[in-house]
Amino acid sequence: MSESAELLEPFFMACDSKVIKMVQISINAIQRFISHECLSPAAASNLINCLWNLMENEIEELRLLQTMTLLISINDVVQNDSLSKGLALCFRLHFTKNQSVNNAASATIRQLVSFIFERVQVEDKNFSKNENHSINFEELKINSKDPPKSLNPAAADAFLLFQDLVQLVNADQPFWLQGLIEMTRTFGLELLESIFNSFSVIFFRHEEFSFFLKEKVCPLVIKLFSPNIKYKPHHAIIQSGQQPSSQPSDNLLSSDKPFFPISTRLLRIVNVLVQNFYTMLVRFYDLK
């Protein structure tokens, strides 16, 4: 495993050639390496860089998504910056002009978000809380690309992903998902809903998550529900000089009425918050 970076180098070189047949053979071989858990963290990082180059050249996009799913789901060798780049790759493919790739990327992202939060549940069972660092709630109020020091590695990755999803839904710049250009509000709200539905226990176990829920998510839901809001454009443009994709907009630019797809997803989120987090929110807001 320690030599996996060197063993994979010929396959990376073949991918760099951009010859379709060679790329296909190389990706198949790389997927076998992943399936047998033969990748070191360094090799995984090099692999994600290789896949990123193929993504930018629109080569074998469906195979890229398959490879990312294998890479992140089989074990936890991909963490921190490598994980964020892999996720950003999938988000980028979600906004291609090819509808098949678009749909596949959407399903892949949903899977990967679940895998990342499942890692937290496994980590919580196997490791105690990080007692070396106390929670600094003042720091949590300021979004950052660095996770709270009080979180263990898997929880730290999940927290940064959660933070950036909220940022993107608010049409703001992500801190951790570097290279991500755009995301629709509707898709972001659906991802948040799935997190609240499936992983509410994490919010009760980790005060960092519950604090962020109270401090950032609840005000965002109220803001998006406001009948007088002038929604920002549907696609949050993150990098200067980038242009939004040509997909139909799901945000109103001039109307005072909330846009229906946004409203329905917000209602579902409110329903989940009430069902799963009522006691927590009562405590936070001193509701009667």
Image (cartoon, rainbow, N blue to C red):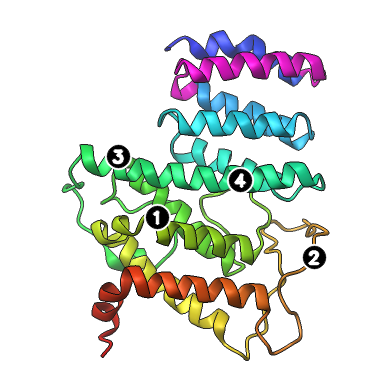
Residue tagged 1 = 198
Q: How many marks?
A: 4
Q: Earlier in the sequence, mark 2 or mark 3?
A: 3
Residue tagged 2 = 248
Residue shown at the point (48%, 23%) measured from the top left: 42
Task: Give the residue type that dot 2 points to.
Answer: Pro
Q: Which residues are magenta?
A: 17-42
Instruction: Name the element at disc 2.
Output: loop
The residue nearer to you, when weighing 60 against 104, is: 104
Left or right: 64 as drawn, with respect to 216: right
Question: Is there a contact, CB below 8 Å, between mark 2 and mark 1?
Answer: no
Q: CA distance from mark 1 to mark 3?
A: 14 Å
Q: Earlier in the sequence, mark 2 or mark 1?
A: 1
Q: Earlier in the sequence, mark 4 or mark 3?
A: 4
Residue shown at the point (68%, 15%) measured from the top left: 26
Task: Give the residue type that dot 4 points to.
Answer: Ala
Residue tagged 3 = 122
Q: Quadrant of the N terminus?
A: top left
Instruction: Name the element at disc 1.
Output: helix
Tag shown at residue 107: 4
